[in-house]
Image (cartoon, helix red, strand yellow):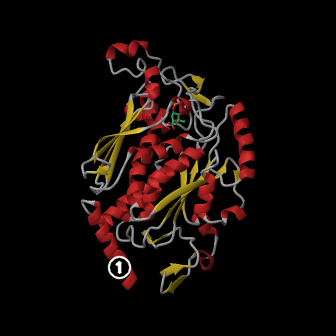
Amino acid sequence: MLTYLTAGESHGPQLTAIISGIPANLPLNEEQINHDLCRRQQGYGRGQRMQIETDQVSFQSGVRFGKTTGNPLTLVIKNKDWSNWRQEMSTLAADADQSRPVTHPRPGHADLAGCLKFNQRDARNILERSSARETAIRVAVGAVCKALLQHFTVKIFSYVISIGEHELGPEIRQQDDEQLALMAEESPFRVPDPQLEKKLKKVVDKAKQEGDSLGGCFRVVARGLPPGIGSHIQYENKLDGRLAQAVMSIQAIKGVEIGLGFEAARTPGSRVHDEIHYAQDRGFYHLSNNAGGIEGGISNGEDIIVTAAMKPIPTLYRPLQSVDLASKQSFQASVERSDTCAVPAAAVVGEAAVAIEIARLFLEKFGGDFIEETTAHYQKYIDHLRLF
Ligand code: EPS
């Protein structure tokens, strides 16, 4: 069973993850993880925090001489910004008097609901953990899972589809997803379209100038997964259900679609379902992939396609109306340093969420305490598919 837990606050000393269940002998190094951490920090429209940080992971357990040992992995990312927040984030009761509590909850943020739930009068105790800073450590966990999946030639990639109301045209969207993701890698918006990129720069600059923020949609694709990951038997083992939960749990995500998604509801069945064919060299395959690679909660051998919608970030430099937690008087919402648009970064976090869930179900199917054992189980199953 692959499980993980993260801890850490946006302006605390560090972010930490403990991952349990990664098989022994998987080659793993910090550079692989830092590559994704760096990708998450990119993107036009991000705030000043990303200029302060250079996120780097360090392994505190579970890796020895470039390979996993089977022991729980401890991953740590230090927050450089902590040095500016030592007083405000102090663990000592004596320092409480000096603090500046956040008492004007931001509409759209966890501030108010979190304060009510945890009986807090200072929203900092909520926002420090609900902050999207947490996604840095989730990306690190995702990079470990990507390394595992790569071992079985499963690749995970992403690109941005839209920011605000501006989106990729239908001709571009028809191109191969991996090619689009490769192009997106060169773009500060992670969009595989230089024309759209120019437009987005203006749109994000305008939003920033007006103290506003922008959301958008991104797509994550997993390629190379064999049929049979996930299960139709119980709700909690359905691959689409797991992916939806994991992607929806990313800060600011409000919608998740698999394959054709909501469009399928508007289209007759004859044009939605993917016809099944067979060829000696390929085995069973589908002529189209509207199902997004999942039928009955089980991977069907086609690309897994997940699209997510991110709302605009709730911190507005021209704040919306709110209410003071103590006086109950009307006030403008607090302004915390923030991004104008973080959709490109969210796409990288989306890759991590997808990688983690696929890796979990992959290990649930193939198991193994060491990677050679997992590989043997996997190979036996691939042979079974070939002989079917
Ligand atoms: C983020 C770090 C945060 C925010 C952002 C994402 O750092 P700080 O609060 O110090 O600027 O920039 O988080 C939010 C927008 C949010 O609403 O929580 C990061 O590392 O991605």
Residue 236: x %, y % from top left: 36, 61
Q: Residue furthest front?
A: 65
Q: Is residue 99 left or right of residue 343?
A: left
Name the kind of residue labelled 1 in the image. Asp
As displayed, is residue 54 above or below residue 39? above
Q: Which residue lies at the image location 49% right of the left edge and 23% below the top edge?
A: 102
Residue 234: x %, y % from top left: 35, 67
Q: Which residue lies at the image location 53% right of the left edge and 84% below the top edge?
A: 277
Q: Find residue 385 and report its image quarter.
A: bottom left
Out of 320 and 166, give the one closest to the viewer.
Answer: 166
Quarter placement of the N terminus: bottom left
Residue 336: x %, y % from top left: 55, 27
Out of 221 and 27, give the one closest to the viewer.
Answer: 27
Q: Is residue 366 left or right of residue 272?
A: left
Quarter placement of the C terminus: bottom left
Residue 388 makes an appearance in the image: no
Mark 1 vs ligand 1: CB under 8 Å?
no
- Label 1: which secondary element: helix
Q: Is residue 161 left or right of residue 282?
A: right
**Few, some or many residues within 10 Å of mark 1 (<14, 14–19, 20+):** few
Residue 256: x %, y % from top left: 53, 56
Residue 166 makes an appearance in the image: yes
Q: How many marks?
A: 1
Q: Which residue lies at the image location 31% right of the left edge and 63% below the top edge?
A: 364
Q: Find residue 97 and report its image quarter.
A: top left
As displayed, is residue 89 above or below residue 363? above
User: Residue at label 1?
Assistant: 383
As displayed, is residue 83 above or below residue 338? above
